Image (cartoon, rainbow, N blue to C red):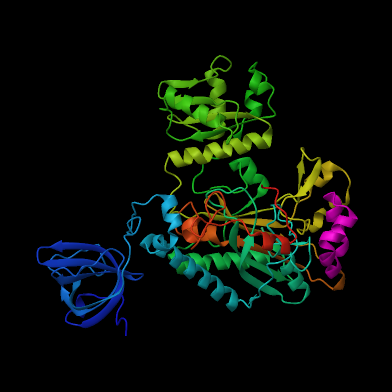
């Protein structure tokens, strides 16, 4: 037997017990005639004591037999800190080269180096905790959904383009020269076909692929908890998945979330938070003040469609330098504002960067609307309505962060509902589906949806919903179109010709002709769920083998070239030299 106990379980109550342990050597310290070794496995660390020098190096894999004894100097920070093993027999199972970085709670290795040796980084406790949390959450999902009668059904990876709005990854088909499969951006069409097929409660924890530019919270392949239900309305879907989230919070973190969860319409989210994923851990709402400031000769306000402001509590002390720095910050392309106007409600009166145009009384009115009082700082932006609200939203989150109001251990989930169905693109002169083209208009907006006027179509709302946590969209879905005629109308509104619709989506329009039930569903981004539950911004730690910012796996060095034979077989020719 390689081991009778793990490195995480022995306690003082085991004193005198003969045990066999196996694991990795994390640290070796020799003290005179004795050597202390930290032995690690994924359950913890146990201290070993050897007489003399056992000749071990870091990351050697060893097996030891010995007796559990009480430690002279206890370590209250370690679960096994009261005991150590007095070793009577050592068996070196495998030697190891000195690892390129320390494999401890905090490593001395840089990100790139650790990515290259991911299998060594994964030995570290923080990553083991992250993957353990991921495992726990996926078990909670399966337990909950199984109990609710959902069936886990796999859908194919080699498919045809799915319209989630990103670029597809494609796979050339050797047997069909010149033709390509697309990897699924989501199982959207298949889960809807499963509804047509009568599997009225489906789920899958499934890999999805999107060829997008990467950010800290994005990976080219990522995992969704994908779900669909038949014979449901929006209320049924929200109820079911609120329940799932509640179980996940409770069982994995011991956290109770509000029951029922707050809901906010998309319009309120945009107006009050400048975002469709509002961070409601803190207030600092956006207020429109256009009517209070227009017509006083200040050009930027007079020519603006919208003027809005936020009140930053207790920050009237912001210095000139800090305000200049903040002005530069809002001018960065990521925020995109033209400038920043401030009003300080100091103890010695109101001061602003627009004093020339407004009296103290005028500015008090603005302060009144924002619920600001002495000691507060008001920040004002102006421009086109939605764009300016978006900028104020970004500024709000930044100020919330600076004030320490975005504690990752505080959880403020909500549903954002009533999304517009369509989004007009000035650039392309056409509508896009805000969610995806299978989302149904609200039944009461079906007449508007048949209209050919842009203004009418812009007003159409959908029973679409997002699950938002701490300013991050964790999931979203909708009630779907289940009627062939309505689906064709959707493609028409999106400017997709009959031929193109037939070529790309003929299968689903056809399926709807054979008795499709009313249905709806949603999907959660599982990697993000894990990272937020773990209180981290980046999802990489929650994925065993993630890609870097360039979409590369630097450990296996992929993507890479393929040889000429393979290229020929696939009828491919590279334009890269
Ligand atoms: N397929 C959608 C997505 O990936 C989710 C859904 O509508 O169920 O965002």
Q: Is residue 398 above or below residue 185?
A: above
Ligand 1 placement by image quarter:
bottom right
Instruction: Decide if residue 343 is on the left or right side of residue 124.
Output: right
**Residue 496: x percent and y percent?**
85, 52
> Would you place residue 175 above or below residue 289 in this image?
below
In this view, 151 is above or below 410: below
- Specify the principal SS of the magenta part: helix
Magenta-tinted stretch: 483-512
484 in magenta: yes
Between residues 299 and 289, which one lies in front from this camera angle? 299
Q: Relative to residue 1, is residue 87 drawn left or right?
A: left
Name the spot of residue 3 as percent of width and height, x first: 30, 81
Question: Image height check: is 471 above or below 62?
Answer: above
Residue 284 seen in render: no
Q: Horizontal placement of 464 versus 142: left or right?
A: right
Q: Choose top left, top right, bottom left or bottom right for residue 294.
A: top right
Residue at image coords 31%, 65%: 59
- Residue 253 vs residue 333: left or right? left
Residue 27 coordinates in the image, percent (x, y): 25, 62
- Residue 530: x percent and y percent? 50, 61
Identified at 68% across, 63% down, the residue is 565
At x 73% / y 68%, what residue is drawn? 190
């Amino acid at each position: 037997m390689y081991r009778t106990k793990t490195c995480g379980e022995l306690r003082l109550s085991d004193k005198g017990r003969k045990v066999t342990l196996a694991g990795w050597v994390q640290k070796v310290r020799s003290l005179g005639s004795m050597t202390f070794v930290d032995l690690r496995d994924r359950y913890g660390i146990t201290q070993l004591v050897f007489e003399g020098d056992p000749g071990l190096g870091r990351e050697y894999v060893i097996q030891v037999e010995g007796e559990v004894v009480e430690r002279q100097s206890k370590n209250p920070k370690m679960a096994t800190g009261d005991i150590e093993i007095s070793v009577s027999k050592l068996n070196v199972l495998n030697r190891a080269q000195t690892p390129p970085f320390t494999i401890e709670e905090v490593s001395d290795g840089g990100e790139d180096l650790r990515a290259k040796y991911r299998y060594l980084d994964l030995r570290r406790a923080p990553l083991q905790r992250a993957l353990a949390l991921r495992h726990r959450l996926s078990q909670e999902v399966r337990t909950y959904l199984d109990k609710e009668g959902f069936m886990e059904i796999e859908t194919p990876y080699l498919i045809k383009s799915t319209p989630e709005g990103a670029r597809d990854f494609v796979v050339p088909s050797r047997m069909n020269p010149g033709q390509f499969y697309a990897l699924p951006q989501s199982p959207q069409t298949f889960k809807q076909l499963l509804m047509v097929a009568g599997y009225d409660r489906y789920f899958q924890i499934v890999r999805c692929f999107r060829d997008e530019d990467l950010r800290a919270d994005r990976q080219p392949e990522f995992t969704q908890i994908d779900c669909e239900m038949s014979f449901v309305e929006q209320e049924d879907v929200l109820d079911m998945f609120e329940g799932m989230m509640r179980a996940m919070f409770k069982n994995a973190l011991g956290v109770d979330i509000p029951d029922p969860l707050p809901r906010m319409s998309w319009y309120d989210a945009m107006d009050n938070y400048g975002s469709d994923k509002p961070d409601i851990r803190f207030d600092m709402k956006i207020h429109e003040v256009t009517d209070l400031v227009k017509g006083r000769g200040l050009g930027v306000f007079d020519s603006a469609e919208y003027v809005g402001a936020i009140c930053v509590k207790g920050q009237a002390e912001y210095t000139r330098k800090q305000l200049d720095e903040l002005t530069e910050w809002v001018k960065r392309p990521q925020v995109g504002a033209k400038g920043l106007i401030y009003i300080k409600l100091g103890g010695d009166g109101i001061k602003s960067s627009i004093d020339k145009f407004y009296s103290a009384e005028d500015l008090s009115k603005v302060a009144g609307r924002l619920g600001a009082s002495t000691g507060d700082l008001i920040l004002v932006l102006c421009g086109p309505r939605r764009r300016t609200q978006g900028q104020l939203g970004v500024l709000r989150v930044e100020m919330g962060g600076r004030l320490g109001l975005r504690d990752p251990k505080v959880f403020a989930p909500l549903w954002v509902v009533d999304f517009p169905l369509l989004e007009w693109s000035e650039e392309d002169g056409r509508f896009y589906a805000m969610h995806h083209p299978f989302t149904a208009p609200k039944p009461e907006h079906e007449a508007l949806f048949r209209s050919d006027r842009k203004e009418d179509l812009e007003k159409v709302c959908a029973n679409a919903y997002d699950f938002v946590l701490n300013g991050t969209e964790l999931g979203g879905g909708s009630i779907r179109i289940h009627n062939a005629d309505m689906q064709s109308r959707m493609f028409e509104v999106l400017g997709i010709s009959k031929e193109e619709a037939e070529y790309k989506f003929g299968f689903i329009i056809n399926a709807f002709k054979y008795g499709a039930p009313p249905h709806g569903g949603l999907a959660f981004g599982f990697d993000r769920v894990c990272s937020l539950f773990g209180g981290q911004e980046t999802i990489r730690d929650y994925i065993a083998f993630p890609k870097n910012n360039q979409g590369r796996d630097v450990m296996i060095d992929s993507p890479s070239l393929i040889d000429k034979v393979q290229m020929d077989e696939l009828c491919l020719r590279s334009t890269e030299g």
